[in-house]
Amino acid sequence: MNASKNPEKTRKLLLESAFTAFHRNGYTATSLNDILSTTGLTKGALYHHFPNKQALGLAVLDLIENSILETWLAELAEERDPISCLQSLLRHIGGQIRRNDVVFGCPLNNLAQEMTSRDEVFRERIGEIYNRWRTELAEQLRRGQNEGTVKSTVDPNAVAAFIVAAMTGCRGLAKTTQSVDLLFACGQQLIQYLEFLRA
Amino acid sequence: MNASKNPEKTRKLLLESAFTAFHRNGYTATSLNDILSTTGLTKGALYHHFPNKQALGLAVLDLIENSILETWLAELAEERDPISCLQSLLRHIGGQIRRNDVVFGCPLNNLAQEMTSRDEVFRERIGEIYNRWRTELAEQLRRGQNEGTVKSTVDPNAVAAFIVAAMTGCRGLAKTTQSVDLLFACGQQLIQYLEFLRA
Amino acid sequence: MNASKNPEKTRKLLLESAFTAFHRNGYTATSLNDILSTTGLTKGALYHHFPNKQALGLAVLDLIENSILETWLAELAEERDPISCLQSLLRHIGGQIRRNDVVFGCPLNNLAQEMTSRDEVFRERIGEIYNRWRTELAEQLRRGQNEGTVKSTVDPNAVAAFIVAAMTGCRGLAKTTQSVDLLFACGQQLIQYLEFLRA
Amino acid sequence: MNASKNPEKTRKLLLESAFTAFHRNGYTATSLNDILSTTGLTKGALYHHFPNKQALGLAVLDLIENSILETWLAELAEERDPISCLQSLLRHIGGQIRRNDVVFGCPLNNLAQEMTSRDEVFRERIGEIYNRWRTELAEQLRRGQNEGTVKSTVDPNAVAAFIVAAMTGCRGLAKTTQSVDLLFACGQQLIQYLEFLRA
DNA sequence: ACATTCGGGACGGCCCGTTCCT
DNA sequence: AGGAACGGGCCGTCCCGAATGT
């Protein structure tokens, strides 16, 4: 487990262990010792790569941001019809969903709800991620309007925000109720809502 | 502030102070001393009324449950058209929303996301509340279908879950981005979605 | 050792243990656990009586201040001839000096030299004590001038400062060199210096 | 700032940076990282030149010893009248004193009071320096007695010790009270005391 | 019954001096 | 000489019983 004298590997190890722990148990409930005992590293290694716990958390947010943009926006930019693409993504993700994805919820939303009131730096960074997600999604919807696949009367910004919020909310509800079925049911409704937006 | 020798008042004081503190700063970040210094009471008083912090938190959840049912379900049972009623509730709440309601988010969702992975008792209790909310809402939709105001092809359970999830998600997004505008935009989309459900 | 449920005793126990430890090992080198293991108490007890280590240190300074004023100023105010009184005090203290008083140095000077550059609150409080010592000693010298026992040409303030500084310096040198003899020799010279101040 | 591949320069850089930091903040409060970030060097460089922090501290003591002997003893050996020479030194030093010399105190005394109780090796080395200072000063006074400029009845050893102690004490008091005036007043009294020693 | 004061432990995050491998 | 990793210690804080009034 120990990645001695391989700083990049060590850093990655810490980061991934932190991501998993934060995702499962939350930021506050995760002690640095939890992360260290998982990785087999010691305080010194962590302190060498990150000045404090907050910095580690922010680095984890970078990871999360990349994952979200990759999952929900990468394909969208390459397809002609954003609505169909979104629906297909929702179905596809739904098809390969694992139990952990349900019971531990959305990593970003977990951190968002936990940290917003406790650390302004975190809140701002998380807000940035949501804004980017929202904005890029709105852009694709606007493109759809121009290309005639999305109803021209809707407000792309409002719709994008709602989609992001709804996805987050669905995953949060599924986590709280520990119910995969509920996630599917909600996802189905979101797909239905998207159908209403077609031109 | 001190309600000496008035047990009910003391209990209520503790409960309300705890609610406010949990809402604003989260459960973990709120120390018992925070609550005590706000109320002017001492440890003994608190531990006389509640065996531990968890019990206090659960009692706060009772408060939250009542508030939610009262706000979102009471009127619904008395109106003929559940869709219009929901839309009117959303507009009404939106009309009298205060900044605090945005920046501190939904009390239930805050606790849900923070506690789910940390305390099974909490999670179960919160899941109960969501389930009750969902179920009673579904019942009203089903009644709407019977009375011909709601499209008969939709699944009342799935729709109810989605509405609850979307509301929660919208409020969560607004909290994270500290944006009242975003809350309104999302709410507008939710109202729009409801429109699609009419018979 | 444990003074359970006797808050005053507990506080005193902590204070005296802290005084001894700070005196012997310095403020920084003394961990709270050192104090706790000496007293048999725990963090909770300490935290109950003092908000933090600094407050404990400041409370120890109160102790030190009283001890200094009692030792070096109390009798002085009651005697006719301040010079003879000071000389007698020096001889008397010298007569009953114990090894610990030499090897651990002056508690106030130890803290002064250690803390001045590290904690402005400490520095200010210690400066206060020295100023009080200086000022009250100067007052007695001025009285001596009025009563004709002290040479009228000397500046009481400067002399008082020098006496305090010299006493401190002598004790510091003795501590560093671990030499009782040196302390006596220096004390003798101070007595000699005082002789020069007679009217 | 970086003195790459110039070992002597690197060593000197470390030493001077360490001296300044120890003088201003004390030995314990100065972390090796403080020194390294000031010099722009790395751990490897430091541990190449010094086996550990203690060795660095001891090397700084060498610097301090040279400075003290140079300042307070070099001229003394060349003058006929040690008392006048000392007085002139005190006045001269007083004339060109800078604020930093007051607020940061005597580098040797700072280390002495901080380290004596914590590190026997340090204590012994510092004791050596004081003893050398004392002894060489006593020698000059003895010479003065032989040459008829110093009163023959005084004990040169005791007087030398007292002078060293008084100087140290004066500077310490000035540091603690952050007062240049106090340093001058005390210095003036020391000059006065020296006057009493003339043959 | 109700409320206060006092004390007990257990970690948590931070930071430090040092060693070891390039 | 550079820099990664080690391991231990410190202060603060927290949740909670236990003893004590009232």
Image: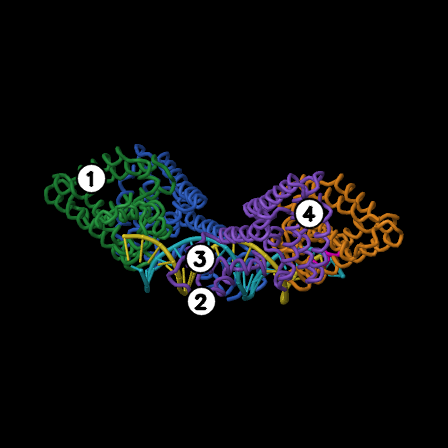
Chain colours: A purple, B orange, C blue, D green, E cyan, F yellow
Q: Is residue B45 visible?
A: no
Give the quadrant of residue C25: bottom left
Q: Tell which tag, 1 or 3, sits nearer the viewer.
A: 3
Q: Per the image, is B61 magenta?
A: yes
User: Height in image: C26 above or below C129?
Assistant: below
Q: Magenta region's main secondary structure?
A: helix
Residue topped by disc 3: A11
Q: Quadrant of residue A138?
A: top right
Residue at the disc numbered 2:
A1
Q: Which mark is residue D86?
A: 1
Above or below, D121 against A84 in this view is below
Query: Type of residue at label 2?
Result: Met
Q: Chain of mark 4?
A: B
Question: For the residues tagged 4 and 2, is the chain the same?
Answer: no
In what quadrant of the picture does the N terminus of chain A appear? bottom left
Q: Which residues are magenta?
A: B56-62
Q: Is residue A197 left or right of residue C114?
A: right
Q: Camera-side residue: D101 or D94?
A: D101
Secondary structure beneath label 4: helix
The amino acid sitting under disc 4 is: Cys
Crowding around mark 2 (Cα neighbors within 10 Å: few <14, some 14 to 19, many 20+) is few
Secondary structure of residue under mark 2? loop
Looking at the image, do the residues carrying marks 2 and 3 touch, with CB atoms under 8 Å apart?
no
Q: Is label 1 in a helix, a strand or a loop?
A: helix
Q: Are marks 4 and 1 in contact (CB under 8 Å)?
A: no
Where is residue A91? Give x, y as percent. 66, 57
Q: Are marks 2 and 3 on the same chain?
A: yes
The answer as to whether the residues below labels 1 and 2 share one chain is: no
Question: Real-space Cα distance between discs 4 and 1?
Answer: 81 Å
Inter-mark Cα distance, 4 to 3: 35 Å
Residue at numbered disc 4: B170
